[in-house]
Amino acid sequence: LMLGKDVKLEVDVDKNIPGNLIGDPSKLSQILLNLLGNSIKFVEEGEIMLKIRLHRQDQEKVALDFVVTDTGIGISKDDLEHIFGSFKQANQQTFSKYGGAGLGLNIVKQIVDKLDGEIKVESTLGVGTTFKFTLPYTKGLSAAISKSKPTEISSEEVKGMKILVFEDNALNQRLIERRLNSWGCKTYITENPIYGLNLLQTTAIDIVLMDLRMPIMSGFEVTQKIRNNTKKEVAEIPIIALTADFTIDDKNECEENGINDFILKPFSPEELLSKLIKNRNEPQTNYNFSASSDDNQVDQTLSESGFNLNAVLEDCMGEFELLEELIGLYKRNALEFIGDVKMKLQDGDIEGVAFAAHKIKCGLKMMQTMELFSIVEQLNTTAKTTKDINHMQFLLNRFVQEYPKAEKMIDEELGRLNKNRNE
C-alpha cells in the first residue's frame, strides 16, 4: 500500500495466529492508528512495517506481538525517556516541520496497560523507530463466525410486543423504530425519562431498551426508578441496556440496578431480535451477562473491496429512503458534535466533551467511518484520563479535517447505490 510521499506500508501477519480471538477491536484499532499515524507523519520516504506475531499460546489464552517499524526521522535519547509521558511538543526544529511529536503516545500507553499488555520503543535519530507492544487475548470458538442470518429465530416471536425505548440520538431512534415496527412491534421511543416512566404507569410494556448514557438522567438512574416502582408488573419488566461500549464497571452497575442484558451499538437486526426473544418475560433477577455477549464487539471494519454502505442498507431493510434519512441525521450529528465540543473545550467542560464523544461513536461506527470513530475514541479516552485540553483540541481539529472526506465518501457511495437500484 503506497501512502504518498514515497512511503510504503507493509503488513505481515503470522499465519499461526488463531482465527477467532476475544478482545477489544476498537482499542486495538486506536493503538494501531495512533502508532501508524505517527509513523506516516515522520516518514518522508521509505517504508512502514506492521508485523503481528504469535508470542505465546495455551489451550485458552494467546499473546500477540505487534511491531510497528518505520524509516522516519527517529527520536532522540532525551525524548525517548519521556515518550510515553503526557503530551508534549518536540524540539523547535521538529515542531516547525512536523507540528509536534509523541502525539497520543500517553493515551496508547494507558490503553495497553488497561488491556494488561506491555509496550516499549527503540529509536535512532535519522534511522527510524520501532514500537513493540504485546497484548493478551482469549481464544474464541474454533468454528468460523457465521455471517449468515440465523434461521432458528423468527420475527413472528416478537410480533405484537410493546417496547419502550429510552434513546436520545435521533439516528438511533429512527433506525430502532423502523426495525421494531417492521417486526410488528408497538414502539414508544423517547429521550425524556419522565415521559417514559409515566408511560410505564399507563401502558402494559413488555420490554424496555435503555440507553445507558443520556443527558437528563442516566440509564442506570431510570432503571432504579423502574425497579423501585410499587407496581410489580412495572418493577419486573425486562430491561436491555443499549451502549456503545461496555466495561466491567458497567456490568457491575447493571447487575446492581437490575438490568437484565445489554447489546452493543451499532447492532444488527439479528442481534436485536435475538436479545428481545431471549429476554421477554424474564424476571428482573435473571441476568444474562455472559462472555458470549462480548462477541458483539467484533469490529465493523470496511469490506475488503473498499468502503460501502451495503450492510447499512441491509440494516435499513433495503429501504433506500431510510438510508438517505439516516445519512442526513449522521451529517447533522457530526456538525452538531463539532460545534458542541468546540464550545465545551472553550468552557473547560471536560465531562461534556467525554459525553459528546461517547454519544456520536455509535453513528460513526454504524456508517463505517472508522477514521472519525478512532479520533472520537481518542477524544473520549483523553477526556476521561489526562484531560489534556491541547490534545483534545488537536483531536477536534483532526475530526474537522477528516469529516469532509468521510462525507464525500458517503455521498459517492449513496450515488452508486442509487444508480444500481435504478438500473
Image: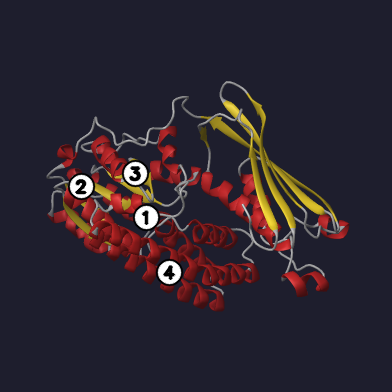
Q: Residue sitting at 49 percent across and 67 percent down? A: 405
Quadrant in the picture for the C terminus? bottom left
Q: CA distance from mark 4 to mark 2?
A: 37 Å
Q: CA distance from mark 1 to mark 3?
A: 33 Å
x and y percent of residue 307 in the render?
A: 44, 55
Q: Is residue 180 left or right of residue 9?
A: left
x and y percent of residue 363 in the render?
A: 39, 59
Q: Residue sitting at 57 percent across and 57 percent down? A: 381
What amino acid is at disc 3?
Answer: Ile
Residue topped by disc 1: 309
Residue topped by disc 4: 334
Residue 259 disc label:
3
Mark with earlier residue (2, 3): 2
Residue 63 in which image quadrant: top right
Q: CA distance from mark 2 to mark 3?
A: 13 Å
Q: Residue sitting at 45 percent across and 70 percent down? A: 337
Relative to 285, say whether 111 is above or below.
below
